[in-house]
């Protein structure tokens, strides 16, 4: 392959977002230059015991850091910007995004003490930037956060359109419809759009996703009928939702209080940047809201996912610092369950009902709409853009698969559709799409301040510990192997000791026998002794109560 | 209160099934006699680490065992009969139920070595039994398992109707519609129905629950189009569903193989009792099913909830012993997600798609209907039965609450509706419904062979262990408190040791310092030493990496 051809090759490498929902990140390689699109976090599944966050594996970026020209961001959700602080610790390059996106990122960088050294560059929707030699257009789309853009990355083979999170809202709250004209123009350009990477989240839903305005109307109806306090829980980043709630509050002569750290932060950022309009005298501090008559108050809160420490959950449990739910309150949960959170949300709803609230939630009402495109919007995107190649993105495997089927039915030839996996090197050449050598794209776990110091072995141990607890056996021996003290059994997470004194006594006497036998046979090797302890206890405990706690022998020599 | 009046009082005590889904159990007390209705298990929530099953607290039954006259069962689901073996270990009384219900119970009793001593009494739907002096009618209703009955318990104050799990299927597979006539007759009797206890599971759904026949039609359509192997996962106890799948297999000239322990067991029991008709030559052993052409096979399997060890999950992962999913297979998941299982099911679906299967699941098709009544059926039950008092049952609090609202809208006076909690003593008298002193009705945990030997403290420890692991510090001292060996730190589930040698080394040296100080000050009390160790480590570890592992000091004296 000639040098000339090589430069014409264009490579896309997903480092996250495929096969699982979260930690979205792509690399674009054109010639020697690398452009990073987004770097998000994923919230850990239940089986990642004790893990706080999951971020993408940056090792490929690290190895090629001198070639990275910059980072472009599509929007300000955690699963797209949450890992940027971890990335910027390794790599100081400019970050491009819309105003609200960078506003939200600033807060994070401040927390990580990185803001001073960061180079954040605001790009308005509809404008373009050059990152190194790579030109990127920011194209307005709609989503559940304001200021979301799809990206057109201009390559020698034609533009690549990256639309990871979007919907088309024909009547958006801020009046800013998606830039259909730009998408159409790119679709009509010569030699045409090289590839479309498109949002697969809602590919299972037929028709169109409803407009955000629908929620506004529902909320207005509810406000009209409410006679006492109103509490609304929603995603803090959904600024348009917040605006609509504030508008209804205004209309029905209620003041607004905010609670929950991310709600307060996001509202402050959005107000400062002009994305949210709230007259100062409409806001009341939560500390003072009990001074207002019940029919004059709206409380906007976090906790729509039933998160145990969030404000709504506390109010439902009755341990919020300033306000608790009581008989007559109207509580609106203006969100849908993120898969895996159904149980927690259900618990919160039960508690709210128990406290006498009138609870309005998704299953029985229209108080939430999705931020992702349904089938007809996905088809519209395909037909506007008319890409040569199609790569479904942002979804679990079944979403990607079904999005591929949808693209086929919209006329994209099967051989031009590529269902990718994280770490795949997707190479576009003049004539084909092909797969190069993969790069590392695993999960890196963040636990407390540690990044990557917890992995599968530690997690396996945590899992074992969580199932049947641990039995620790301590024996002190002298240098000849004579037992001076022990064996002593200490347990945690195993059984109530008072319920099982006999069990432990019998286990101890079996251990004593086993160790005496070792002594008699002059067995002094620690590894042999430890195995003896493990086997003896394992057998006995399993036979008696069919459990397999972790058994940890510790030998002390004096 | 005169003796005469007291005998007329009727008490119902729920020991489970209210406020959470599962472990359904009620006690009926009339005069000196106690009747038990159902005794089910609950599958543990994720936070019940290591727990296998949850059963009701039998302590009230134990204290009053001489008054218990018998157990009546509504149907054969685990959440209604699963705890019977544990109950019969404490109480040898006759058990009444329909044929299939007792058939399924027999299998359980065999496993627990209890069958020989049990007194199981078959009651046909439409018939009555006397349990002690209490007359109970078994009234046919529809549900997702054959042979389900509502119960009418005749009391001096009128009949109580207990309909915990039901729907009204106007076109059931076995032609056995619910016994509307009996319900109507009771509703019209004098002095009328005392109370209705009715299923709240689907109270959030409008209209009627679809007939099981709808599923049959959908499955038939899918079978007609399938060219290669067909795999259907469903609940093993849904005998009507199994029959419909077998019928379609027959029609399209396919043989049927069964896999999964509960599927094989339930099919065998249902065939033996005549609830399932499968010609012998239609069945093929799973070991031989690869001898059949792909378009001649249907595989019926467990695993519709994505359970990690179930047959479908293994086939999807590629580690089933006999058969694995491959390109071209049609896989039907004929079930809906039990709340909390959404993630696991999603994972299985993703893996099935990855293996090239054509996967048909609830979100995108009509391959499952619920076994519980929707709003219109619940209203029909209320209108047929016309109860004086109404107690919503079988549901989380929000379901009970909404069912109460529905009953109100159907004309039951608010003061005659009672939202109960597990352990409540619901007393009916001639003139009122009132609450007596509660009885114990907590959760008893079954872990391995242990019943009740794991409780909240053990679970709290398992939770702590699961989050950040454990640091064990061992020190050997002589009788004067001089340190002979240690402190040694051993960790499990904490961090990769190779990543944190420095951390552990520094922690050890801080411990040494702290202990030396104790030695110097002649501190020899073990509790003080242990606290010193705990505080020193806690502070250091939290400051360094913001984690809080369990810290367990062990002092050995020689």
Image: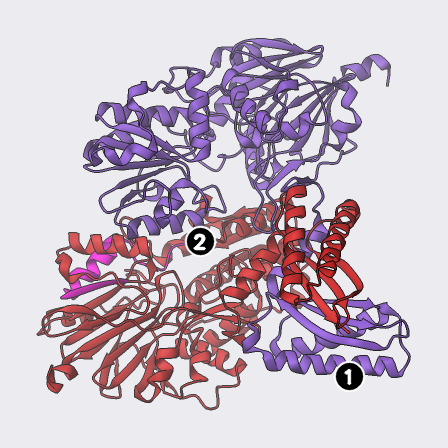
Chain colours: A purple, B red
**Residue B291 drawn at (x, y percent):** 68, 63
B509 or A105, nearer to the observer: B509
Name the residue located 54 percent from the left edge and 25 percent from the top edge: A107
**Residue B351 drawn at (x, y percent):** 62, 48
Q: Label 2: which residue? A: B339
Residue B274 visible in the current orientation: yes
Residue A417 visible in the current orientation: no
Q: Quadrant of residue B199?
A: bottom left
Numbered label attached to residue A513: 1
A96 or B389, nearer to the observer: A96
Q: Quadrant of residue B426?
A: bottom left
Question: Callout 1: 10 Å neighbours few (<14), some, many (20+)?
Answer: few
Compared with residue B55, is residue B122 higher up or lower down, i.e. above or below?
Answer: below
Q: Is residue A102 left or right of residue B414?
A: right
B446 or A395, nearer to the observer: B446
Magenta segment includes B61: no
Magenta segment includes B374: yes
Q: Quadrant of residue A88?
A: top right
Segment colored magenta: B368-392
- Which of the chains bears the disc numbered 1? A
B38 or A6, nearer to the observer: B38
**Residue B81 drawn at (x, y percent):** 41, 74
Q: How far apart in space, not on screen, are marks 2 and 1 (Cα)?
A: 49 Å
């Amino acid at each position: 392959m000639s040098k000339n051809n090589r430069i014409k090759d264009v490579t896309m490498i997903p480092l996250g977002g495929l096969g699982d929902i979260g930690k979205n990140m792509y690399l674009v390689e054109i010639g020697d230059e690398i452009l990073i699109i987004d770097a998000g976090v994923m919230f850990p599944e239940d089986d990642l015991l004790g893990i706080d966050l999951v971020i993408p594996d940056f090792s490929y970026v690290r190895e090629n850091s001198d070639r990275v020209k910059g980072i472009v961001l599509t929007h300000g959700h955690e699963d797209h910007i949450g890992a940027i602080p971890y990335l910027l610790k390794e790599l100081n390059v400019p970050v491009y995004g819309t105003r609200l996106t960078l506003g939200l990122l600033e807060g994070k960088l401040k927390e990580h003490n990185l803001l001073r050294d960061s180079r954040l560059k605001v790009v308005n929707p509809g404008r373009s930037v050059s990152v190194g030699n790579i030109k990127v257009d920011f194209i307005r789309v709609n989503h559940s956060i304001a200021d979301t853009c799809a990206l057109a990355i201009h390559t020698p083979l034609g533009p690549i359109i990256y639309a990871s999170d979007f919907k088309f809202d024909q009547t958006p709250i801020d009046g800013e419809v998606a830039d259909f004209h730009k998408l159409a123009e790119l679709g009509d350009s010569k030699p045409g759009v090289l590839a479309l990477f498109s949002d697969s989240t809602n590919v299972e839903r037929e028709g169109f996703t409803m407009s955000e305005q629908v929620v506004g109307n529902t909320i207005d109806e509810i406000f009209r009928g409410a006679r006492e306090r109103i509490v609304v829980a929603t995603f803090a980043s959904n600024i348009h939702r917040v605006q609509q709630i504030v508008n209804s509050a205004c209309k029905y002569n209620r003041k607004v209080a905010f609670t929950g750290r991310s709600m307060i932060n996001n509202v402050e950022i959005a107000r400062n940047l002009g994305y949210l309009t709230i007259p100062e005298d409409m806001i009341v501090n939560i500390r003072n809201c009990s001074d207002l008559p019940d029919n004059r108050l709206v409380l906007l809160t976090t906790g729509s996912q039933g998160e145990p420490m969030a404000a709504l959950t506390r109010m439902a449990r009755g341990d919020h610092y300033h306000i608790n739910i009581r008989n007559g309150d109207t509580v609106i949960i203006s969100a849908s369950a993120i898969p895996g959170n159904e149980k927690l949300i259900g618990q919160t709803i039960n508690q709210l009902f128990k406290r006498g609230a009138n609870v309005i939630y998704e299953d029985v009402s229209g108080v939430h709409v999705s931020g992702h495109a349904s089938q007809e919007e996905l088809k519209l995107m395909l037909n506007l853009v008319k890409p040569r190649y199609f790569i479904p993105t942002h979804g679990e495997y079944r979403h990607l698969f079904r999005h591929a089927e949808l693209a086929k039915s919209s006329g994209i030839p099967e051989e031009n559709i590529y269902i990718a996996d994280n770490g795949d090197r997707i190479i576009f050449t003049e004539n084909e799409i092909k797969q190069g050598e993969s790069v590392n794209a695993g999960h890196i776990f963040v636990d407390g301040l540690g990044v990557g110091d917890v992995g599968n072995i530690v997690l396996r141990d945590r899992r074992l510990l969580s199932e049947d607890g641990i039995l620790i056996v301590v024996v002190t021996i002298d240098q000849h192997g004579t037992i001076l003290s022990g064996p002593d059994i200490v347990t945690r997470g195993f059984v109530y000791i008072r319920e099982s004194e006999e069990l432990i006594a019998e286990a101890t006497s079996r251990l004593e026998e086993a160790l005496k036998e070792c002594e008699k046979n002059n067995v002094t090797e620690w590894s042999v002794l430890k195995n003896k302890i493990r086997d003896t206890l394992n057998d006995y405990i399993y036979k008696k109560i069919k459990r397999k706690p972790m058994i940890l022998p510790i030998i002390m020599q004096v």
